[in-house]
Image (spheres, rainbow, N blue to C red):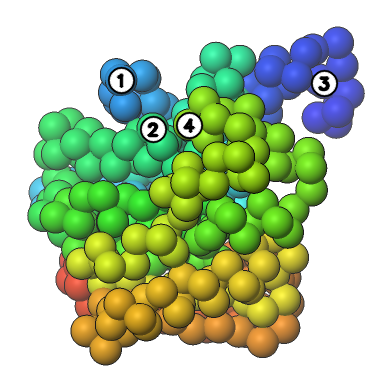
Amino acid sequence: MSRAAAAGGMDEFEKQQMFKALTDLSFYSQLGGEMIVRKVQYAGADDMIIPAYLFAPRDTTVKRASIIMVHGGVHYDLDDEYVWQIRTLIGQGYVVVAPEYRGSTGYGRSHYNAIDYGGKEVEDVMLAREFLGGFVSFADTSRTGILGWSHGGFITLHSILRQPTWFKVAVAHVPVADLVSRMASHSAGYRKIFTDQPGFGGPVETHLQNYVARSPASHARELKVPLLVHAADNDDDVFIEENHHLRDSMTVAGKDKAGLYTYREWHNPPGGHHFSRVQTRQGLESWMESLAFLRRYLKPEVTAPLR
């Protein structure tokens, strides 16, 4: 039976929960034979319960560097398209935790409607480090990195800007970087997602400062953590101007010359917005560079050959 047929008669949130259960099974079936795969929960902002995935090498006698892996998408979730990258990270010796922060799909109406873009969702993700420190004895939180794509890259940027002492390194792929620019380039339906959130208070035209405050490009001077950003000039979601604004802000703040900000842009890579998540020459090039950047600062205990 197809997923669509199986979902007949369900409301939207029931469908999301069913698909999430199927995704969980996919993770266990694809990865459970070679690593620790667990579904966990921890307290996020305001003690809201945040579901998360925990992936780790089977050898738990070694204290391991940790990575918080942040999924992308407005109202999305971690899916099994990330399997090959999770497999590589575990092979490199990391403990990986992937939070399903507020607004993620698959956990019912209240979790979905709690979306707070650039607000408490960032705290939800950052507090995954506290979970690792308190409940995962083999995680070395003094060597914590953070890695995210798109919206997850946006959360990655905010995390290191708000709590720089919590992270040793960060990698953001095609990150949302400038909400003012984004509101100008996206549809009315997309903008309404933001207008309806209390944290923004209304449209950008009347609440500009709220959008500026939640734009990473506005906070370049606060960068204290080594950051690698990868972008694509054919991105049809995070238009390249957003990352140019971030790049220019980082340059004016001197973060590139200080060795804190590293930027690379691909010209017309296959996949566009998704280029670094597909196994093309450009995607693998981006991924290998990201792994090398993480290794430089986290120094993981490698458990398997790089692949």
The answer to whether residue 66 shows anywhere in this view is no
Image depth: mark 2 or mark 4 in front:
4
Amino acid under disc 4: Gly
Residue that appears at 46% across and 71% down: 246
State which tag comes first along the sequence, 4 or 3.
Answer: 3
**Residue 306: % across, % down:** 39, 75
Q: From the viewer's perspective, tell me whether residue 227 is left or right of residue 121.
A: left
Image depth: mark 1 or mark 4 in front:
4
Q: Which mark is residue 46?
A: 1
Q: CA distance from mark 1 to mark 4?
A: 15 Å
**Cβ–Cβ under 8 Å for marks 1 and 4:** no
Q: Is residue 3 above or below residue 65?
A: above
Amino acid under disc 2: Lys
State which tag comes first along the sequence, 2 or 1.
Answer: 1
Residue that appears at 63% across and 21% down: 17
State which tag comes first along the sequence, 3 or 1.
Answer: 3
Q: Secondary structure at mark 1?
A: helix
Q: From the viewer's perspective, tell me whether residue 239 is left or right of residue 49.
A: right
Q: Which residue is mark 4?
A: 199
Amino acid under disc 3: Ala
State which tag comes first along the sequence, 1 or 4.
Answer: 1
Q: Which residue is mark 3?
A: 6
Which quadrant of the rendered structure holds the N terminus? top right
